[in-house]
Amino acid sequence: SPNSCDDMLCSCMDVADLISYSLVCRDTRRTVDNYKRRAYRLHRVLCRFMSYDDVDRFRVLQTLTGAVVSGSIALQFLDRVNYSACDMDVYTDVHHVYEVFAFFSNIGYLYQPRISHARDAMDEEAVPTNEVGYKIRSVAGVYNFTRPSCPTAKVQLIIARHAVIDVILDFHSCNSHHLAVVMNIITHYAAYSLYPYETFIARRGLCLNKEYGAASRPILDKYRDRGWRMLHRVVDAAGSQFAEGTRFVGDRMTWVVPL
């Protein structure tokens, strides 16, 4: 079918090439627009974790709670690829943890406590604890969920003490790594990438933590294996997204993909 042929062609292009191709004529613009509507659908990356209808319900949950998806799921969504072995990282603030917890429980996920965690997971006193030992001030707790009907589907619920974006910017500083390549989020409304050119075109990642050590190597190697060249210092070239300066979500360097 024409759509299949268009998808085969467009899927081979990076973001810059798609933009260039869309500018050739009206037909190519229409082709790219139609392809993007199919490629950037949240169902594509979440179908391993929940049903088609549950994806729609999850987006409603995001609207009501402000929960976002980040990590490898957001990265592969924007990169239009699939990583078969990755978790679904869901971030919410401490005020909405119960609604998010209930959603995953209702669709068949089971909370997997650590052996040392003897209390009920929904115990109010248990929420501020850091379930898997992340030493991050912005994180109140991290809870793991698995689905017996699909053992490879694993969800991590990361609870922010305050704003979720605070955790996104701080989360990967644990174990002495802090990576720009994973600073992407999916909200109920859109997907956002803070370093789109460097991440998806130049294929470069910046390790922002100067205290880089041996504990960071497995994480950095994972992204090297996925095709990124990892940098350890700021790039001063004019126009570089890795240059020093003030940034904010939604600025002119942010890539926004409406859902």
Image (spheres, helix red, strand yellow):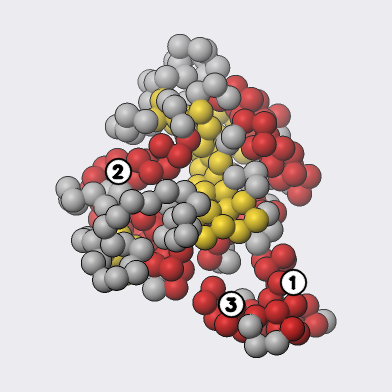
**Residue at the (24%, 45%) spot, across then down:** 176
Say which residue label 3 marks.
Answer: 19
| Residue placed furthest toward the bottom | 24
Which badge, 3 or 1, is on the more N-terminal residue? 3
Disc 1 crowd, CA 10 A, few/some/many (<14, 14-19, 20+)? some
Say which residue label 2 marks.
Answer: 173
The percent position of residue 178, horizontal first and vertical second, equals 30, 49
Task: Report the Cα–Cα distance between label 1 and label 2.
Answer: 38 Å
**Residue at the (58%, 53%) spot, across then down:** 191
**Secondary structure at numbered mark 2:** helix
Q: Amino acid at mark 2?
A: Ser
The percent position of residue 236, horizontal first and vertical second, equals 23, 67
In the image, residue 147 sits, relative to residue 189, either above or below, namely above
Work out which quarter of the rendered image holds the C terminus and state it. Answer: bottom right
Q: Amino acid at mark 3?
A: Ile
Judge whether residue 241 can be spotted in this image.
yes
Work out which quarter of the rendered image holds the N terminus and state it. Answer: bottom right
Say which residue label 1 marks.
Answer: 34
Q: Nearer the viewer, residue 3 or 226?
A: 3
**Residue at the (56%, 41%) spot, across then down:** 68
Question: Where, by quadrant of the figure, is residue 234 drawn?
Answer: bottom left
